Amino acid sequence: MPTIVIKRSSEYVNKLRAIDIYMDGKKLGNITDGEEQTFEVPSGEHRLKAKIDWCGSPELSIKLADGEAQLFQLSSFQKIQRFIMLLFVLGAALLVTHVFVRNVLLMNVAVGLFATSLLSIAYMLTLNRNRYLTLKKLDDN
């Protein structure tokens, strides 16, 4: 019987939460932070997806032959999370600076950075919710 192996990255985002793994719309199980899970699945063509609450990954089309093992990497929205944190930290730094120098421009820029970071998070959790997680096939080694 074919197997799929899913390795979940250890990340501070969703660290305490399990991510559910679905194949053809049916739940196979879940995977916790930094964990690796192996699932036995039937051979043939399938659709693989990861979900956490209302967010998830894009569906992957996979084809499995008898005795075959495929390896996948699961992570959260890594590309944007550092950018959002940078905006948030810069906004906080400018806000603290504003307290000491009382500069209206610094206050406006700080509020703009905070708003941009919050809007980015809202975008990831609503309009881009099916790209919140990344599930990609790794090369066979």
Image (spheres, rainbow, N blue to C red):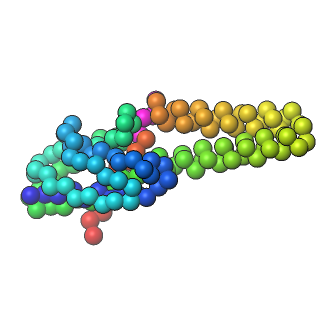
Answer with the quarter of the image where residue 59 lies.
top left
Task: Please give the range of residues in magenta.
Answer: 127-131
Residue found at the far right of this picture = 101
- Above or below — where is 37 with respect to 59? below
102 sits left or right of 129 in the view: right
Image x and y of residue 21, in percent: 27, 46
Camera-side residue of 16 and 86: 16
**126 drawn magenta:** no
Residue found at the far bottom of this picture = 141
Answer with the quarter of the image where residue 45 lies.
top left
- The answer, for residue 47, to whether it is visible in the render is no
8 sits left or right of 42 in the view: right
Q: How many marks?
A: 0
For the point 73% across and 33% down, the residue is: 111
For the point 18% across and 44% down, the residue is: 46
Answer with the quarter of the image where residue 7 lies.
bottom left
For the point 41% across and 40% down, the residue is: 131
Quadrant housing the N terminus: bottom left
Helix, strand or loop for the magenta stretch, by majority:
helix
